[in-house]
């Protein structure tokens, strides 16, 4: 596995990136500046990267910033032909959740979010079955296809896994074919 | 010289008269006579500023005859009215010295011209908003975040869409007679180009003959359309509406000759009004009532 680990503290990035020191992630130019700073950090990563985007120091997150720092960041990285970026969002507070959910839904995206208490969940456009498949992997850390098949006998399993991989909320090793939960990779790599 | 007699009660219910006066095209000299004002709220104050700014934008010279009532003058001072009015009106009368801030002032009248102003508003409102929302409205402590998000989005509307200066203010009141509970009123107004002109290039053709101030407001308010082709845009007003509804509040936008509202059960406002006098720019009012 050749994933470049990247840790990004958005709270500190807001202060560094925006001309004056802002403690809140509000207004679209601020969000755009933070997203571009994250993209700049990713530009020096290898062909594949895993980034931990830490929102724990962000108190106010408005919809414009959530759109830039979460939805547009994911969307642009999904569209890239040269770089395969994976993201996990840490420190997602209840007060951030609604904004993130709305912007992900608008662009039909999915993201892995870890709350302040350490619980992990999928936000965005995900159905109940996909969430169950993802949760199994999240609980176990890494699995091969047969492990999933022992729990899920439905014909839709393959499609669900493909969609989770396509949206990069699950990592599938191209060499072993093994599926990895992003949280496990974060623990191992970061 | 045209003289506009400012209503004795200058609040959210009478501000239409002020905005109607502001829309008169071709007025070179306009005197806003506020001598007889006995009661004013931030909605009325911001409307007065906008009315003066519109006259000035059209090349006119707005003058403001200050109220006789010392309580009204004191309140205008504490809300920061004269700081903003000095750049718009020729003030006729003695402006009182700056007094201490009122305990229930959530946000003094603040000019919004750039994104930095939005940041300043959000920074400024944090401590007071938490206190007022919890103690006066009975909202949870975390509501300050949603309140800040609402403020941020409505203020950004001025910077991103109006392309003109604007003002914001917020205040808590005890609406004893009308609602028998406290409310927080957020007022945002600008002298920009209004919703129809903002959306015109991108959406007018699709609406054909139906395009106008009302359809433009419906497009933005109900369907989240913006002048930007970016599909991530336009969520602000939609999400504000949703949050205001969760809090059983009301939100109203007036622009051009139309007004659109999301009306809760306790309000008797009409959802759509389309025969108002022309007003350039936009006026957004949000009323958040205390939990019953």
Image (tube, coloured by chain):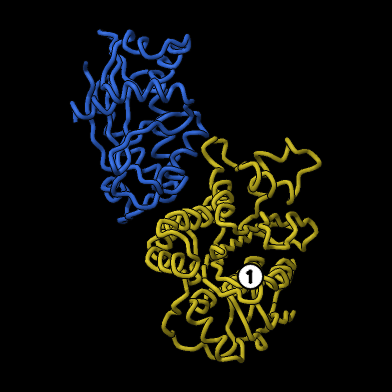
Q: Secondary structure at mark 1?
A: loop
In this rendering, does residue B149 appear at all?
A: yes
Percent position (x, y) of residue B184?
Answer: 54, 67
Could you say which quadrant of the image residue B16 lies in?
A: bottom right
Would residue B281 appear left or right of B105 to someone viewing this image? right
Residue visible at 36% across and 43% down? Answer: A33
Quadrant the N terminus of chain B occupies = bottom right
Could you say which quadrant of the image residue B52 lies in?
A: bottom right
Q: Find chain B in the image and tell me its colour.
A: yellow
Taking depth in this image into account, of B117 and B260 the one nearest to the observer is: B260
Would residue B193 appear left or right of A119 to someone viewing this image? right
Would residue A167 appear left or right of A47 to someone viewing this image? right
Residue visible at 51% across and 54% down? Answer: B159
Taking depth in this image into account, of B196 and B42 the one nearest to the observer is: B42
Taking depth in this image into account, of B186 and B283 the one nearest to the observer is: B186
Taking depth in this image into account, of A3 and A156 the one nearest to the observer is: A156
Residue visible at 27% across and 34% down? Answer: A52
Percent position (x, y) of residue A95?
Answer: 40, 49
Residue visible at 39% across and 46% down? Answer: A94
Q: Find chain A in the image and tell me its colour.
A: blue
Would residue B43 appear left or right of B103 to someone viewing this image? right
Examine the rendered structure and indicate whether residue B113 appears above or below residue A129: below
CA neighbours of label 1 inside 10 A, class few (<14), some (14 to 19), many (20+): few
Quadrant the C terminus of chain B occupies = bottom right
In this rendering, does residue B56 appear at all?
A: no
Could you say which quadrant of the image residue B97 lies in?
A: bottom left
The residue labelled by disc 1 is B179
Host chain of mark 1: B
Examine the rendered structure and indicate whether residue B127 appears above or below residue A174: below
Percent position (x, y) of residue B26?
Answer: 74, 68
Percent position (x, y) of residue A136?
Answer: 34, 22
């Amino acid at each position: 596995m050749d994933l470049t680990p990247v840790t990004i503290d958005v709270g500190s990035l807001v202060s560094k990136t925006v001309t004056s020191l802002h403690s809140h992630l509000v207004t679209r130019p601020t969000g755009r500046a933070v997203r571009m700073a994250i993209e700049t950090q990713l530009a020096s990563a290898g062909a594949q990267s895993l980034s931990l985007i830490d929102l724990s120091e962000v108190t106010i997150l408005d919809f414009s910033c959530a759109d830039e720092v979460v939805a547009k960041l994911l969307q642009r990285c999904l569209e890239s032909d040269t770089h395969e970026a994976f993201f996990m969002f840490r420190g997602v507070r209840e007060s951030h959740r609604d904004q993130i959910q709305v912007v992900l839904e608008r662009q039909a995206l999915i993201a892995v979010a870890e709350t302040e208490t350490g619980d992990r969940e999928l936000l965005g456009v995900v159905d109940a079955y996909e969430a169950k498949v993802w949760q199994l992997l999240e609980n176990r850390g890494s699995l091969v296809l047969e492990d999933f098949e022992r729990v899920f006998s439905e014909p839709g399993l393959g499609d669900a896994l493909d969609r989770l991989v396509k949206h990069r909320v699950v990592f599938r090793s191209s060499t072993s074919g093994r599926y990895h939960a992003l949280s496990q990779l974060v623990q191992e790599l970061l | 010289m045209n003289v506009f007699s400012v209503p004795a009660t200058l609040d959210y219910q009478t501000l239409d008269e002020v905005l109607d006066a502001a829309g008169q095209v071709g007025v070179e000299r306009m005197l806003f006579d506020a001598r007889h004002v006995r009661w004013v709220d931030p909605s009325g104050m911001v409307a007065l500023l906008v009315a003066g700014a519109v006259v000035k934008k059209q090349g006119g010279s707005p003058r403001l005859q200050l109220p006789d009532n010392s309580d009204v003058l004191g309140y205008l001072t504490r809300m920061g009215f004269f700081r903003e009015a000095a750049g718009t009106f020729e003030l006729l009368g003695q402006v009182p010295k700056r007094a201490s801030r009122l305990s229930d002032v959530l946000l003094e009248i603040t000019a919004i011209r750039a994104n930095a102003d939005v940041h300043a508003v959000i920074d400024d409102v944090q401590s007071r908003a938490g206190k007022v929302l919890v103690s006066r409205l009975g909202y949870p402590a975390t509501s300050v975040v949603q309140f800040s998000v609402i403020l941020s989005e409505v203020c950004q509307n001025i910077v991103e869409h109006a392309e003109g200066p604007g003002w914001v203010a917020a205040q808590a009141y005890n609406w004893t007679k009308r609602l028998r509970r406290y409310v927080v009123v957020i007022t945002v107004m600008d002298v920009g180009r209004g919703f129809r002109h903002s959306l015109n290039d991108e959406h007018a053709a699709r609406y054909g003959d139906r395009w106008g101030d009302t359809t433009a407001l419906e497009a933005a308010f109900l369907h989240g359309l913006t002048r930007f082709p970016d599909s991530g845009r336009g969520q602000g007003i939609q999400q504000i509406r949703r949050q205001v509804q969760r809090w059983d509040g009301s939100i109203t936008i007036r622009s051009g000759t139309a007004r659109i509202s999301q009306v809760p059960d306790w309000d008797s406002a009409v959802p759509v009004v389309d025969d108002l006098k022309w007003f350039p720019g936009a006026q957004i009012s949000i009323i958040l009532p205390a939990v019953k």
